[in-house]
Image (cartoon, rainbow, N blue to C red):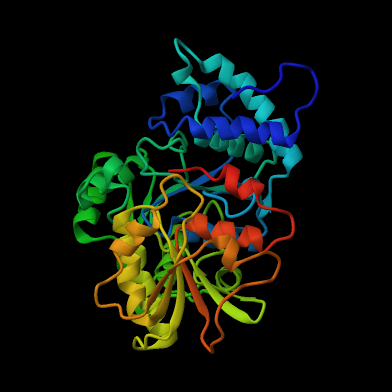
Amino acid sequence: MSLSDSDAIPSFPEVRDFLFGLRNRGSKYGIGRMERLAEALGHPQRKFPVIHVAGTNGKGSVCALLESALRRGGLKTGLYSSPHLVHLGERVQVNREPLTEERIIRLTEMLREAARKVVQESDDDYPSFFEFMTAMAFLQFAEESVDCAMLEVGLGGRLDATNIVTPEVSIITSIGLDHTEILGETITKIAGEKSGILKAGIPVVMGLLPSDAEGVVRERAAELSCPVHSVRDRFREAELPETNLVGRFQRWNAGTAQLALEVVRTRFPLDPCDMRSAFQNTVWSGRWEERKVGSRSIIFDSTHNPQGAEVLAENLQGRFGSPRGELEVVVGSLGLARAWAVLRVVAPYARRILIVRPSQPRALSFDEMRSVVPASFQGEVLETSVEELFPGGDCARFSEGPDPVLLTGSIYLIGEVFSRLQSDGLSETLDLQDRI
């Protein structure tokens, strides 16, 4: 886990291996270490305005929509999201420009110096991979003097490393059953964890939440005297803003983003035309994104939990109509409940299901994936790999057919495929995606 103590500037592979070692030590929940690390760095998170976004699904899309609108309005923006698809630097962007390898090296060196100061009685006090990346974002945004940074919560909210900021507005996009082993097994418990991002007197914007989850958020907001704004109260569905991001739920995400921008309009005034244009030109890869690969069109959609599977079902219905059992579907997942939710949705549309294993320790085995294929499915179920399906470059090996291929499941799977479709190699995606 250590870099050389020599005065020589480390190489990116050395920094990569150091970060890889932090990741292998696992996730650490709680904000005590993050607070100490930020203090050792001089509290960079206090040097720029923040919009803080939590949620089971949609938080990345809402961050992307917000960033697009503010940048279109002439502001210098920061965007912190996870995981990355191909390059580590994608996690920390200024005006949508990812961190370079050189910048990652320099920031990692600064963070290592600060981390030594926060280690107390044991090495268990050493910051985690996600804490390093969060602090890296804070340093970058402070040094670049961004006008506003969109911070996506990594997991939950209350104990997430990002939760040391005091934002202009807090956003909770959605609440569903995911990461239940950590956040709790009920909607209300998960809502309690996500509402942990609320700060005294700071307004909160709620996306389309279940009624019991909304009750928890409203109760917490009342305790902290937070003004509450609900997208359900602000918009009827027909009034939701348009966006190029595909799907009904993306329009609710756009409504959530617009409502948040209305809440902070005195701090960040925007021309409504700029906002509408930004929402219709937002880039957020791997979310129902159709690409031409060789002779085939492929829809990449990172559906990784039951709530996301409901959105996938809507998108399939909207794109293909009633199930016809004619699609070729590639799927790989982390967790049986997630795989079951996705396969239940895609099986009626599929004539062939190609099971792959994402390059992650928690990826399901072929046998585990087969065990949750619906018994009613009459088509082929084949075992394959990303390497076999995508040998590299613009090549993809699928049977001929008029319909696009659907590739869905874990976002890590999509990142691996995107990596193979680029010419600069695979190592960063396979080595540096965190493994929650």
Viewer-closest of 1 and 317: 1
Q: Is residue 197 left or right of residue 188?
A: right
User: Is 325 above or below relative to 156?
Assistant: below
| Res. 70 image quadrant | bottom right
Q: Quarter holding the N terminus?
A: top right
- Image point 41% across, 58% down: which residue? 333
Q: Is residue 358 above or below residue 108?
A: below
Q: Residue furthest right?
A: 8
Position of the C terminus, as image quadrant, is: top left
Query: Whole-percent x and y of residue 392?
Result: 68, 64
Residue 339 in which image quadrant: bottom left
**Count of numbered marks:** 0
Q: Position of residue 377 (x, y in %)?
A: 30, 77
In front of the other: 193 or 366: 366
Image vertical order of residue 60 relative to residue 111, above or below? below
Residue 195 screen position, x and y as percent: 31, 45
Q: Position of residue 306 (x, y in %)?
A: 31, 62
From this viewpoint, which residue is outermost toward the top? 121
Say left or right for 425 vs 333.
right
The answer to which of 181 and 215 lies nearer the viewer is 181
Residue at 37% across, 88% down: 324
**Residue 184 appearing in the image:** yes
Left or right position of 370 against 41: left
The image shows residue 34, relative to residue 287, as above or below, that is above
Classify residue 429 as left or right of residue 126.
right
Q: Which residue is at 67% across, 58% downward?
A: 74
Q: Tell me, yes or no, if residue 148 can be seen here.
A: no
